[in-house]
Image (cartoon, rainbow, N blue to C red):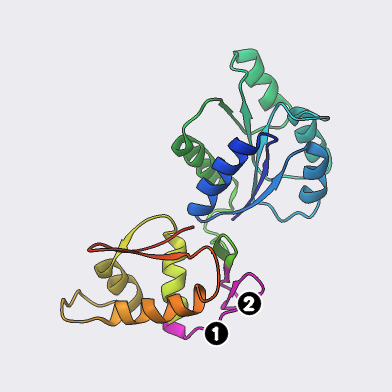
Amino acid sequence: MRILLVEDDVRIAAFLSRGLLERGYTVDHATSAEDALDLVSEGIHDALIVDVVLPGMDGLEFIEQCRERGVSAPVLILSARRTVDDRVRGLQRGGDDYLTKPFALAELLARLESLLRRAAPQGVEPSRLGVGDLEIDLLRHEARRGARTLALSQREFTLLEYLCRNAGRVVTRTMILDHVWQMRFDPATNVVDVHIHRLREKVDHEAEPKLIHTIRGVGYVLKI
């Protein structure tokens, strides 16, 4: 899922971008509505997160222009304005949800996921997954890290897909064996560790930041 974040506050933008990346989203960031209009015209974003107070064109006018141009992606509005009239105005001008500042990252992620579920056609699975500059194409069965194509075996691709689907969440060896190998846990096997090692060499080789992390005594997590 690709998110367009329109936020001029560098500190807030960095905080949100990191949280979204760790959750498995790809993030494009614009500091002004004018720059965001250039990005949104590409039609590649699954959702927009838009601050109301922006330099030049404000966030509500930007949302209106997006709707006039046929952009149908759901929009989550961020604003320090918290009156009922402010919320109603934001929804009337094209927003789908309204979150007041300050907010908890967990609530923003939950609201975003709710918007994406409502916007997605029922029963349609995403064709791409990724974290940061790592992206896997489920239809073409390809994986890339930045400009580099990853040469993965069938098992490695399945393992990477499982980690991407659980980006930001720790998965245990038992869970991996169950979902990737469809086998019950065998405490004597090191098959998961061997495949994780091989996958890490391909995904994280000469790349920063490292994405595949070991949680000692627990399992593994894919995150920035």
Q: Residues within 10 Å of mark 2 (few under 14, many from 20)?
A: few
Q: CA distance from mark 1 to mark 2?
A: 9 Å
Q: Disc 2 marks which amino acid?
A: Arg
Judge whether residue 223 can be spotted in this image: yes
Where disc 2 sits, the SS reads strand
Q: Disc 1 marks which amino acid?
A: Ala
- Is 72 positioned to the left or the right of 108 in the image? right
Q: Residues within 10 Å of mark 1 (few under 14, many from 20)?
A: some
User: At 33% from the left edge and 71% from the top edge, which residue is drawn?
Assistant: 179
Please state the horizontal and vertical placement of residue 187, each as a whole percent of the image. Answer: 16, 76
User: At 41% from the left edge and 59% from the top edge, which residue is drawn?
Assistant: 166
Judge whether residue 70 can be spotted in this image: no
Q: Quadrant of the N terminus?
A: bottom right
Which residue in the structure is indicated by mark 2? Answer: 148
Find out whether residue 175 is within the magenta segment: no
Which span of residues is magenta-colored?
135-155
- Is 217 positioned to the left or the right of 152 in the image? left
Query: Taking 43 as reference, is 158 above or below it?
Result: below
